Image (tube, rainbow, N blue to C red):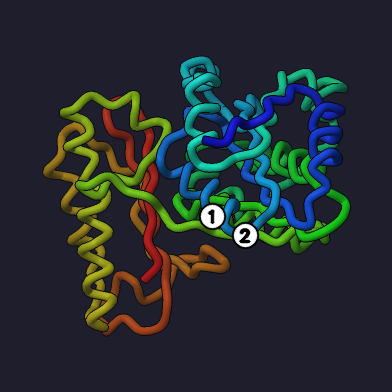
């Protein structure tokens, strides 16, 4: 098993990368509480790059609830073990003062209209905070030579769209890779937040995947989607409170005009869903 080098500062990170002198570098930013979904990102990076670097940093800026931030799981030792098994070379685990060394930033990125819908509507400021830290981390992990790739999970679909737009708009010299969602045997999308669910809540949360599959099946058969049927499934789960269930354009996230109509589905779309299960907010999605 590979033993990752743990670094805590920008200087240590740069020194470790320089010592490796890779021809290609794969970077995976995370907030820790790692699971098999993260491991799939690390393994994808391992397959394509000479050096694999991950970050473990719980970013306060993307939490709009102080209690949510305080409760977020922090388990660096376990995270390093999982990273080692997946072939990670360097774990960058900084303190907040190392990332925001001048204090919380005065100059910020604006996620714009894309960041105000769906998750942004439910969590105001979340995407501005996410972009702030991803922008910094992409700079800090930049090897300055050779190939540079960054890996993100498709589960956070809106986040991925925004990061792609930021990289394009600001001309970041990095190639983005999207890695498919990893699910439990029963279909629940793996998430660090799943650890906060009771067994009863985990069973109830399966409605997210079932409802998506209903719509995905109709889309595959070019049938009308009738998404109200999927929305109705949530009324049967008293532990689950639906926030949104929509079918959108995969690139712009604009709701498809025909997704509730009785016309056959054609083309491409992306099903997005968010719901609160007990006290835990979960998201899921699937391209159709």
Q: Is mark 2 on a helix, strand or loop?
A: helix
Circle 1/circle 2 CB separation < 8 Å: yes
**Residue 123 shown left or right of residue 115 in the figure:** left
Q: Which of 210 and 49 is in front in this view?
A: 49
Position in image of residue 287 (x %, y %) = 40, 67
The tag on residue 44 is 1
Mark 2 Cα shell of 10 Å, populated few (<14), some (14-19), many (≥20): some
Q: Nearer the viewer, residue 102 or 274?
A: 102
**Residue 216 shown left or right of residue 247 in the figure:** left
Q: Label 2: which residue? A: 48
Residue at 55 percent across and 59 percent down: it is: 178
Measure the C-alpha gap from mark 1 to mark 2. Answer: 7 Å
Residue at 16 percent across and 28 percent down: it is: 200
Q: Is mark 1 on a helix, strand or loop?
A: helix
Q: Quadrant of residue 120?
A: top right
Residue at 19 percent across and 27 percent down: it is: 199
Position in image of residue 208 (x %, y %) = 27, 48
């Amino acid at each position: 098993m590979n033993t990752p080098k743990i670094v805590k500062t920008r200087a240590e990170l740069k020194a470790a990368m320089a010592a490796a002198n890779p021809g290609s570098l794969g970077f995976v930013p995370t907030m820790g509480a790692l699971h098999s979904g993260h491991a799939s990102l690390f393994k994808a990076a391992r397959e394509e790059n000479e050096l694999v670097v991950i970050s473990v940093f719980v970013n306060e800026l993307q939490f709009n609830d102080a209690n949510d931030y305080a409760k977020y799981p922090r388990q660096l030792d376990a995270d390093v073990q999982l990273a080692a098994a997946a072939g990670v070379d360097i774990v960058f685990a900084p303190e907040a003062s190392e990332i925001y060394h001048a204090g919380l930033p005065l100059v910020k990125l604006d996620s714009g209209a894309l960041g105000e819908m769906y998750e942004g509507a439910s969590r105001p400021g979340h995407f501005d905070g996410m972009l702030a830290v991803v922008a910094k981390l992409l700079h800090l992990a930049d090897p300055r030579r050779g190939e540079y790739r960054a890996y993100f999970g498709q589960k956070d679909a809106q986040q991925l769209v925004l990061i792609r737009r930021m990289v394009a708009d600001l001309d970041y010299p990095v190639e983005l890779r999207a890695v498919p969602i990893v699910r439990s045997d029963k279909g629940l999308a793996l998430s660090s937040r799943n650890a906060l669910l009771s067994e009863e809540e985990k069973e109830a949360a399966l409605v997210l995947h079932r409802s998506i599959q209903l719509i995905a099946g109709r889309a595959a058969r070019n049938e009308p989607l009738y998404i109200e049927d999927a929305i109705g499934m949530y009324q049967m789960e008293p532990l689950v409170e639906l926030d949104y269930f929509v079918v959108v354009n995969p690139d712009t996230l604009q709701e498809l005009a025909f997704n509730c109509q009785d016309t056959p589905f054609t083309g491409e779309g992306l099903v997005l869903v968010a719901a609160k299960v007990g006290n835990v907010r979960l998201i899921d999605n699937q391209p159709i």
